[in-house]
Amino acid sequence: MGAETQAELELEERGGKLVARARGHWTVREAATIEALLADRLREAKAIDIVLDDLQSLDTAGAWLLYRTRRDLTHDGRTVEITGANPAQQSLLDEVAANDAPCPITPPAPPQPIRLLEFIGQRTVEVGRAAYTLLGFLGLTIASAGRVLRRPRLMRWTSLFFHMEEVGAKAMPIVGLMAFLIGIVIAQQGEFQLRQFGAELFVVNLLGVSILREIAILITAIMVAGRSGSAFTAQIGTMMLNEEVDAMRTLGIDPIEALVLPRLFAIVLLMPLLTFYADLVALLGGGIFCWLALDIPPPMFLERLRDAVEFETFLVGMVKAPFFAAVIAVVGCREGLAVRGGAESVGRNTTSSVVKSIFLVIVLDAAFAVFFSAIGV
């Protein structure tokens, strides 16, 4: 390409201003040369006048480089003017200026296996963080409980008795109803299956072992988690939104001692009693079904139950009760103290409290099943 067709930039000082006179063809073919000229030769000037009188041709690429140079130098605090453009050249400069808007580029979506791995990784990290936070809160609660047990005067007795009533006495109707119906269902399903082998009498064995070891405590824990655990979260969460917990801290009152421990002790004390109550009501429902559907009178039912069930069977269910209760209370209170923002957060954390409590209760029940099997109980 001849020299007369190349892009040139002639510089001269005039009245304290750098005049840059563009010559040649400022087109896409000369884009690299134009960019180097504008970047190297205009770097130090404070006031610049780019004159286009002698420009032979200008296309969109050249107009964009001119506009970009003016924009960047102006952003750095310099004064830049572009003069001498004919109507066609000015139209190009105006067009590139009007279209200088960020163009969002959406990256292509990764393949489905990669998205699946990413989802699993994110959820794993979230579960790990939640478990770490819950363990930390559990440790804080245990430390506060030890301090209160050493100094009983720190216990909020009025709050403790109030929550004992809420968790225990007021939960008895729904727990009793559920246990009664579950007892009937287990007896009916057991009779339907055992009838094929002529072993309907063993329905009593099925009732006794399943209810005392697993069913009654699980039903009770699930009902308490849905009823009391969610209430703990909603109550404490509302206090968080109203800044009552912050006010307590300002007054030197430990929220763990004032809010968490009364609820924790109440549910731990009452869960074994509710479990025992559920055992009796569920066996009552199963016994009534056996009497009416299988012609097994109550004296025979009780005698068969005594032969089928050992004391260890009853003890297995009762041992689980305080551990399940502690999980429900700790999760419910922790979710309540984690409420932030607005009322939507209360609902979200209440739902999370119930889901986490039931999940952890089932996981803990599975761990107990493995443990009792290992020790032969």
Image (spheres, rainbow, N blue to C red):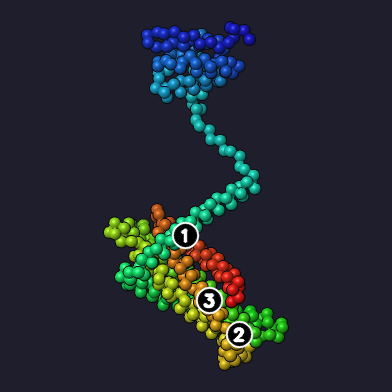
Residue visible at 46% across and 63% down in the picture:
331
Where residue 32 sits, quadrant-wise, is top right
What secondary structure is found at the residue carrying circle 3?
A: helix
**Distance in Å between CA atoms under marks 3 and 1:** 25 Å
Alpha-carbon neighbours of circle 2 within 10 Å: few (<14), some, or many (≥20)?
A: some
Residue 60 shows up from this direction: yes
**Distance in Å between CA atoms under marks 2 and 1:** 40 Å
Query: Percent from the top left, x then y, of residue 230?
Result: 44, 65
Of the numbered discs 2 and 1, the one sitting upstream in the chain is: 1
What secondary structure is found at the residue carrying circle 2?
A: helix
Residue situated furthest right in the rendering: 197
Of the numbered discs 3 and 1, the one sitting upstream in the chain is: 1
Residue bearing the label numbered 3 = 317
Alpha-carbon neighbours of circle 1 within 10 Å: few (<14), some, or many (≥20)?
A: few
What secondary structure is found at the residue carrying circle 1?
A: helix
Residue 56 shows up from this direction: no
Residue bearing the label numbered 2 = 308
Residue in front for this viewpoint, 191 or 71:
191
Residue visible at 63% across and 46% down in the picture:
114
Residue bearing the label numbered 1 = 135
